[in-house]
Amino acid sequence: MRRLTTALAALLAILCTHAIPASASEMQTFGKPWCKGVPVHDYRAPLEALPPVRRPPEKLPFGPRKLSLYAFSFPVVVGESSVGFGFFDETFPRRTLHLNWELTVRVSRIDSRGEVLRTVEERTLRLEEVSHPDEIDLRLRVPAGPALYRYDLEFHNLQSGELLGSYSEYLRVVHRTFHARIAVNRPTFRPGQTAYARVENPGTEGVFFGLDYDVQRFDAGGWVHYPSGHPGGSLLIGLSMGGGGSGWCMRFHVPANAEPGWYRFTKDLAPASRFRHERMYTAAFRVTSS
């Protein structure tokens, strides 16, 4: 139970402090390509220009059949953090694994061509008989300043020194920025048409949000809830979108008797690292006469 609690706490910390995958972007698309989202800022572009590397497989060809590797924080990291890998043994109940490995992990700062500038941190582990592989921590620290890095793993036979496998993974560290917004697919609509608004995140920090949103109409000098719109509500943390992503639409079918004028979608969004600091974001559109 202690190990499970520690693992869950570590996972929550990672989700709350890093640019996280755009898990919400593929949801609630209503069959519209625009709602599926596109990158509004590609933070991975510098990594894709680097020379190819042999990336760590989920299953090591020289390891126990049901031992898996999983990654922390790749490929874009927001600010100072830790990156690396962990082990997961699919066998239950737990067993003792006879690994017989000398494992070296290293983080190096690199230039835009992939050349090593300096080693940031390196650690070597001797793994003989292991009862709890989930407790093996292969994470290393990376500084907060924007830069490119390469994470390397080298597996050697503990007795003979034979190289069993060598793998690498690139990562990029970026400054923390939060620039969440919502956007409407068109500026104007007529009665009978449907307006769509999606969440967009051009910043680096992940954004959290719930299912709720509202549609309002500008009337008598102020914005009021539109009765035929979506019911409003409080922020329910449940969806996330990584830095540079977009998607997850809200929908409003303009009634046949809708009065011409200004309308808007409203939705609460929050930074992943401060999800209690949500605030309302808006995206306005105009309804014209038919």
Image: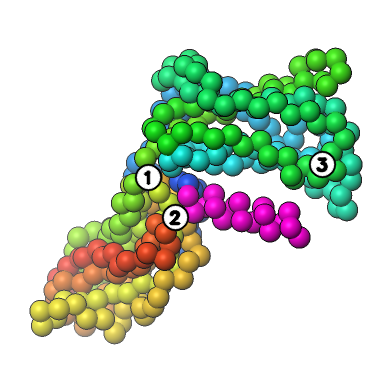
Q: Which residue is mark 1?
A: 176
Q: Residues within 10 Å of mark 3 (few under 14, many from 20)?
A: few
Q: What's the mark number on residue 130?
A: none
- Above or below for 272 versus 163: below
CB contact under 8 Å: marks 3 and 1: no
Please name the residue that numbered disc 3 is placed on: 66
Query: Given this view, does label 3 or label 2 mark the residue nearer the observer?
Result: 2
Q: Nearer the viewer, residue 62 or 185?
A: 62
Q: Which residues are magenta?
A: 1-17
Give me the C-alpha separation between circle 2 and circle 1: 10 Å
Specify whether 198 is left or right of 18: left
Tell me what residue is drawn at x 53 percent, y 21 percent.
Answer: 119
Which label's residue is closer to the chain start, 3 or 2?
3
* Circles 2 and 1: CB atoms closer than 8 Å: yes
**Amino acid type, callout 1:** Arg
Query: In the image, what residue type sits under mark 3?
Result: Lys
User: Residue placed at 74% from the left, 29% from the top?
Assistant: 125
Residue 260 location, quadrant: bottom left
Q: Main secondary structure of the magenta part?
A: helix
* Amino acid type, label 2: Ser
Residue 195 makes an appearance in the image:
no
Q: Is residue 264 visible?
A: yes
Label 2, residues with CA under 10 Å away: few <14, some 14-19, many ≥20: some
Residue positioned most to the left: 221
What number of labels is visible? 3
Q: Position of residue 241 (x, y in %)?
A: 44, 53
Q: Position of residue 77 (x, y in %)?
A: 47, 40
Which secondary structure lies at badge 3?
A: loop
